[in-house]
Amino acid sequence: MNLRALPLVLGFLPVSPIAAQVPRYLGGDLGISWPQFQSASPGGGAKLSGLVAGGRLRVDLRPVSFELSYSQGRLAADTGGAPARDIVEGSLFLTARPLPWLALKAGPHLRAYAAPGGTERWVLWEGRAHADAPIIEGQWLAYGEVWVAVASSVNVSSGASGARGAEAGLTLKLPQSPKLLQSPLWVRLAYVVDQARLKNNAGTESLQSVVLAIGLGGR
Amino acid sequence: MKRAALAFALVILTGAAAGAVRAQTPTDQVARGIRAYRDLEYDSASAILGAALAQPSSALADSDRVRGLVYLGASALYRERRDSAATLFGRLLRIDPRYHIDQLVFPPEITGLFQQMKLITRAVAVVVPPVTELHSPGDALSIWLYATTFHPVDVAVLRPNGAPLRTLYQGGVGDSLQLRWDGRAADGNPPDSGRYVLQVNSRGGDGRVVRSAMLSLDLTRVRRDTLLLPAPVPNSLLKPEQAPGGSGLRALATGLVAAVAVTVLPSLVAGRSSASADRFVVAGGLSVAGILGLRAQRRAQPIPENIAANRALQLAWQHQADSVHAENVARRQEVRILIRAGTSRVVEAP
């Protein structure tokens, strides 16, 4: 684990009182994604893709909120003889919203690739910045999120060097009333990409996904 | 000379005495007649009381008239004029059917004759409150009937033109009877304002009306004023419900920038890894959203907060208006009737 980045994670916490204007809510979504895994190493690489199902749960305890996610699926080789593997991911982020359009998150992100030859486990302590930009006020929302692993570890001999990622997408609120636009349902379409690096240039692992989810409550 | 002076003095005294007599009121005469009766001067009492009672009815109060009649009747009986006494007692009972002769003052032969006349004289006294206001459903004018003797009566309220408005009672009445009138006609509707007559017909043994007690009732319908409806919410208090459409460029820019970000994210994050073409689905979605956002933003935008605020104002006004309307309906249906009773009079049947 890279402890040098721990102050950065803790640095997200003091901004939480500014987020008092965010309404209290409970929200979450369920969806599927189509991930594409790609590894590169001096000895070669592999490309796999598959289907993953997952969901998120958000609990707003004003001035902070917690965001829990879990997903699970299976990846199969697109080309070559790479063995198929299961992918399981989970994360728990503490979120503060210093500005109405900006949220800062911090927390652990776990990812495991379970293959016949063994399971590769990543533990990433991430700091994330999330920005919202309305396309149609109260209805359509574009958002972007970037993150960096401030501490990382993997059960591979070369060790983890770090990770970073980004997500961009669109949430569409389903209108209930043509005037008041109050509906608890919304749809999310997003593209997610991240890359984890091994030490000593031993290789990289990147994962890209298109996510389609339907949500309820706060976005 | 002395005789002339004496004659002059007599003339003066006689004239003064005559003037004193002329100055007496009928009430004084009744009192004087009663004193004469008590002095056993029945002839003198009869003359004085007869003169007093011969005055017009307006000159003598009913109470004095009744008092004079009973002493005049008693004097007549003592003068062995029984028929006259009976007639006088009958006349008394028609004026005051409730009259009770004082058995401590008059001997049994007089009270006996009086009671006999009371048994055969059919008359009713009508007593109502001078002013009655009816405003609740259970309110009614209280009418008390006091009869000289048991006999059949019919009680009705007559219109100003004499036509019956409402029959209140038909049947016998003994000592007394209380009736109630709710101030309405036979059909249940309140009559117009005007002077009505409460008529109590006393019937004889043959069923014919022997006399009627009449009492005027001045009836006034009082309506409560209705309330004004609250003024509609002025436009100055209403907030605009739509914001004018903008250029929409911000929505378009947001969508396109996000689309570009999705397109370039793989190279920024994953470097040399091959980018997934799937991301173009998301980029396309963001682009389309931006374009649709551009169109949507050009249209006038509803302002939910203002719409809700205006609706709350309108609902509050509507609530007030409904309350006022309900109150006015109640006030229109509410009929207050003011009844002022006149004096009772007895009309003998022809």
Image (cartoon, grey):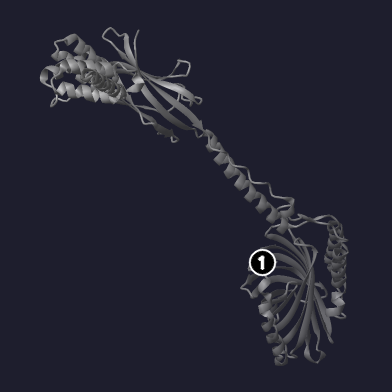
Q: Name the foreground residue: B82 vs A85.
A: B82
Image side of residue A3 versus residue B208, left or right: right
Image side of residue A173 versus residue B175, left or right: right
Q: Position of residue A25 (x, y in %)?
A: 63, 67
Q: Position of residue A98 (x, y in %)?
A: 71, 77
Image quarter where the C terminus of chain B lies is top left
Q: Which residue is mark 1?
A: A28
Do we see residue B132 in this rendering? yes
Packing grade of label 1 (10 A; few <14, some 14-19, many >=20) is: many
Tell which residue pokes out farthest to the front in this image.
B1
Q: Position of residue A146 (x, y in %)?
A: 78, 78
Image side of residue B205 versus residue B241, left or right: left
Identify the chain of the residue marked 1, using the numbered disc in the image.
A
Task: Please tell me whether residue A56 is drawn above or below residue A119 in the rendered image.
Answer: above
Q: Position of residue A7 (x, y in %)?
A: 70, 89
Q: Name the foreground residue: A13 vs B275.
A: A13
* Badge 1 element: strand
Q: Name the foreground residue: B111 vs A199.
A: B111
Asked where in the image residue A93 lies, by quadrant, the reply is bottom right
Task: Please tell me whether residue B152 is drawn above or below residue A161 in the rendered image.
Answer: above
Image quarter where the N terminus of chain B lies is top left
Q: Residue at x 83, y 61 (%)?
A: B289
Q: Residue at x 66, y 63 (%)?
A: A217
Asked where in the image residue B118 lies, by quadrant, the reply is top left
Q: How many marks?
A: 1
Q: Name the foreground residue: A193 vs B107.
A: B107
Q: Amino acid at mark 1?
A: Gly
